[in-house]
Image: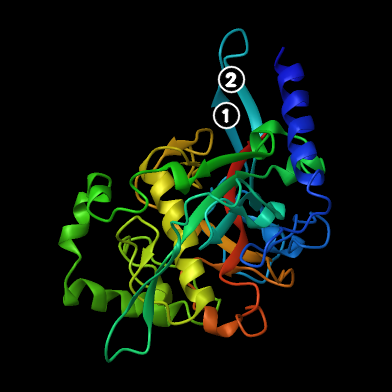
Amino acid sequence: MNNLNRQLRLVVTLFIVFSSGNTHAQGASCTGSFVNPITDICWSCIFPMTIGSVPIIPGSLPDTRNPTIPISYCPKPPPIFVQIGLNIGYWEPDTLVDVTRVPYCMVNMGMSLGGENQPQVGGRTTAREGDASDGAFYHGHWYKYPVIYWLQIMQSAACMATDNFDIAYLTEIDPLWDDDELSFILNPEAILFGNVVSQLACATEAMATSTNRVLPFDVLFWCMGSQGSAYPLTGTTNYRDTPIQAGTLILERLNYKLHRQGIVWESHGEDGAICYQTPMPLLPKSRYRYQMTNTIPDALWAHPYTTTTAIWESGHDNPVSGDNFGFINFKKRNCVFL
């Protein structure tokens, strides 16, 4: 029955994608294309790959902490009780994210859901006097994207996402996403960081991560480096210095929001804890890097969260297509290869 359900969902997904005539979103305000898993993904960005703390395939981007020993003993239900495996670490491309000002514009699928009369919720919201930047509101879509499983790059189910390709989250149907006051239910601690001193602390992270060579500081959980503040956990941005900067901030905020709601769980790079995944209400920024997939794919490199977009955004913003962006998240996967 489970296999039948999976096949039906795959057939429906493929029908939706290809029944649009081609894989490009229709309409002047909604643009994008279906992500090609071969050409549109930075495959060198899954490295470094480690066994224990020893890198077996080096990478150009910074890495998080890994277990010190190469082998773990993971508890299992009877009659196995204990299973032995290798401690593997790598950066798994496991989710796609749309950031768009057009509701139901599925940028990474190259299509738009709904008709012409759908509610137009996203868009520019403010223009402040005496300020060169303005605010905006964006929607986000979170896709499960088990590309490692599709291509059978890994052979252990514990070391990759094995879900079906699926739309896991749409902010259009979330009443907390477009209401800063209502979202206070999710992040009441935000009131502690709405002051100059707390925001000035974010400058240290912004400067440190400006070279693509330093991981963000998880201890500064209310900061998103050069992108701005992590709060509120909504689609509203007070600063829109560039469209890509604002889109990247929304990508990181949506990830934080899903962690806070217990939807996204994390693996751990410590001895003994590597056997499990657990919920983390604070976003572990250092365990994520991102890459642009739409509307202009950038398959040459990825960037740790909070890294300034100034070092890579040139040539990747199409003013004709509007503020429609697609990203892929690379998530640090520490696992026991059984």
Q: Tell how many labels.
A: 2
Identity, as a three-letter code, of the amino acid under mark 1: Tyr
Q: Going by the picture, which residue comes out furthest to the top?
A: 79
User: Can the viewer see residue 215?
Assistant: no
* Residue contact at pointers 1 and 2, CB within 8 angstroms: yes
Relative to 144, is 280 on the left or the right? Answer: left
In the image, 317 versus 280, the foreground residue is 317
Position of residue 253 measured from the top left corner of the image (x, y, whole percent) = 42, 58
Q: Which mark is residue 29?
A: none
Q: Is tag 1's residue or tag 2's residue first in the polypeptide sequence?
A: 1
Relative to 225, is 212 on the left or the right? Answer: right
Relative to 292, is 153 on the left or the right? Answer: right
In the rendered image, which quarter is residue 126 located in? bottom left
Identity, as a three-letter code, of the amino acid under mark 2: Val
Position of residue 213 measured from the top left corner of the image (x, y, whole percent) = 55, 76
| Residue occupying the point 58% across, 54% down | 97
Which secondary structure lies at badge 2?
strand
Using a 10 Å C-alpha cutoff, classify the residue at mark 2 as few (fewer than 14 neighbours), some (14 to 19) or many (20 or more): few
| Residue occupying the point 34% across, 62% down | 230
Query: What is the spatial separation of the Cα atoms under label 1 and label 2, in whole angstroms?
Result: 6 Å
Which secondary structure lies at badge 1?
strand
Position of residue 138 measured from the top left corner of the image (x, y, whole percent) = 46, 61
Position of residue 86 measured from the top left corner of the image (x, y, whole percent) = 67, 39
Q: Is residue 217 above or below residue 49?
A: below
Residue at image mark 2: 82
Using a 10 Å C-alpha cutoff, classify the residue at mark 1 as few (fewer than 14 neighbours), some (14 to 19) or many (20 or more): some
In the image, 20 versus 256, the foreground residue is 20
| Quarter of the image with the N terminus in it | top right
Q: Going by the picture, which residue comes out furthest to the front?
A: 117
User: Can the viewer see residue 144?
Assistant: yes
Q: Which mark is residue 73?
A: 1
